[in-house]
Image (cartoon, helix red, strand yellow):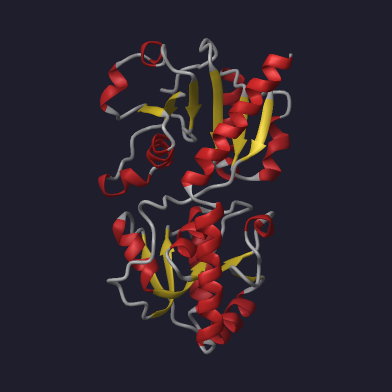
Amino acid sequence: MKFLIIQENGRHEKNRHFRESQCLKRALEREGHACTVWGLGHENYSTSFEKISEDCDVVLSLENYDTGWHPSVSSFSGTKIFWSIDSHMTLDLHLKHCQKSVYDLLLNSSEQYLEKFHGLVKYAAWFPNAYPSDLIAPNALVSRNVPVGFCGSSIPRRNAILDAIEKKVKIKRDTFVIGSDMVDALSSYQIAFNYNIADDINYRTFEATAAGAMLLTNYTPNLEKLFDIGKDIIVYDSIEDAIEKIAFYASHADLRESIAGSGSIRSHSQHSYDVRANQLISIIDELERHANLG
């Protein structure tokens, strides 16, 4: 199968190979499929969409923040797919995008948003976020000596929670640490603190577990469908609960390490881009079976 993946090129050189389009491209290629990434900022962007897609079987758009450059894919004769990863941030934009381009399939990283696209696409499926197993694993050269760490973006609500917790417990903050430095930071944490925005299960959920840290995160809808809560990861429901659980797991190393190990196995076996690539192929095959029966 030959794929064209549409997504703007990464704006940070250090992190470009972690972009969804590049991670999925590598995973699909490892499965024997041909794959080209195209979009604003890529060297091949001067080639028109019509030209670059003419011999492809599947067009898959991962562009969640279109600034007006994304073409309509309606005229493409193959399978047309849109993966909405950030519906919790840009739902209206994604709905308008699906009205502009008639997609055969909508994938959404948050299951609860699928119903919002009813009538705009032919089929819809839950397709959670993932992590690149070729880029993220515990770094044996990094000592896991940070009791509690946070690695991620700085937003007011998240900062307020971190500030409140730090009145009782010290958390090492690695704000906007990206690329291989992010992997090293996560590899140094014993407990990786996370705060999901709204109802999104973010990338750090998968990255922290894959890097071998014990994940402590707030509850997010459907999280229990991806991880065994209490065995693979630990969930807190308030600032006070987070403080208590940090203190408990900081003083129970064997239990903490058991949970970290179980979470790492879960992410590796169920949440890598290689797993998602295989799931994607299965979904496309099912679409084709439906089309043939129709």
At 48% across and 33% down in the image, what residue appears? Answer: 62
- The answer to which of 78 and 46 lies nearer the viewer is 78
Can you tell which quarter of the image residue 157 is in? Answer: bottom right
Residue 203 visible in the snapshot: yes
Position in image of residue 86 (x %, y %): 54, 42
- Judge whether 173 appears above or below 222 on screen: below
Q: Outermost residue toward the bottom?
A: 251
Residue 92 visible in the snapshot: no
- The answer to which of 161 and 129 lies nearer the viewer is 129
Position in image of residue 211 (x %, y %): 42, 64
Position in image of residue 116 (x %, y %): 70, 34
Can you tell which quarter of the image residue 236 is in? Answer: bottom right
| Quadrant in which the C terminus is drawn | top right
- Judge whether 237 appears above or below 27 on screen: below
- How many numbered callouts? 0
At 52% across and 10% down in the image, what residue appears? Answer: 75
At 57% across and 55% down in the image, what residue appears? Answer: 197
